[in-house]
Image (cartoon, rainbow, N blue to C red):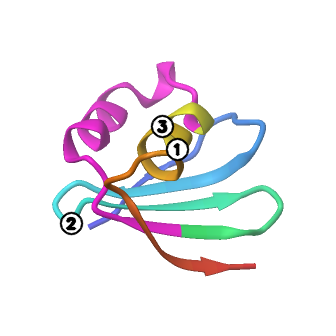
Amino acid sequence: MYYIIIHKSQAIKVLAVDLIKGKAVVEFKDGHTYSYSNVNRLAILNLMLHSVEMSLGRWVNTNCVHNKRAELFAYTY
């Protein structure tokens, strides 16, 4: 089940994460959507507990985009 995070971000419209499956879906304000698998579950849990205090863009860059473990498996525009 996805946990939806929506709060003020310069670039990200919606971030949805699935702790059990280790997945993240990122919808940017420009309409592009990226789906990642094999995302670190501890990072997802930390985001779920502290998302109000975190930069969503930094979290996505660190745990999805620039993470060797995470895999991009879908992209829409």
Nearer mark to the viewer, of 3 and 2: 3
Q: Which mark is residue 60?
A: 1
| Mark 3 Cα-neighbour bin, 10 Å: few <14, some 14–19, many ≥20 | few
**Residue found at x 57% / y 27%:** 55
Q: Residue 31 at what x, y percent from top left?
A: 78, 68
Secondary structure beneath dot 2 equals loop
Amino acid beneath label 1: Val
Q: Which mark is residue 42?
A: none
Secondary structure beneath dot 1 equals helix
73 relative position to 8: left or right: left
**Can residue 70 be found in the magenta stretch?**
no
55 relative position to 35: left or right: right
Quadrant assignment, res 57: top right
Disc 3 from disc 2: Cα separation: 18 Å
13 relative position to 51: left or right: right
Amino acid beneath label 2: Lys
Tag 3 residue: 62
**Residue found at x 53% / y 51%:** 65
Circles 1 and 2: CB distance less than 8 Å? no
Magenta-highlighted stretch: main secondary structure? helix
Disc 1 from disc 3: Cα separation: 6 Å
**Residue found at x 78% / y 37%:** 10
Q: Which residues are magenta?
A: 35-56
Tag 2 residue: 21
| Mark 2 Cα-neighbour bin, 10 Å: few <14, some 14–19, many ≥20 | some
Vertical side of 37 occupied by 19: above or below: above
Considering only order in the chain, which callout, 2 or 3, is on the residue closer to the N terminus? 2
Nearer mark to the viewer, of 1 and 3: 3
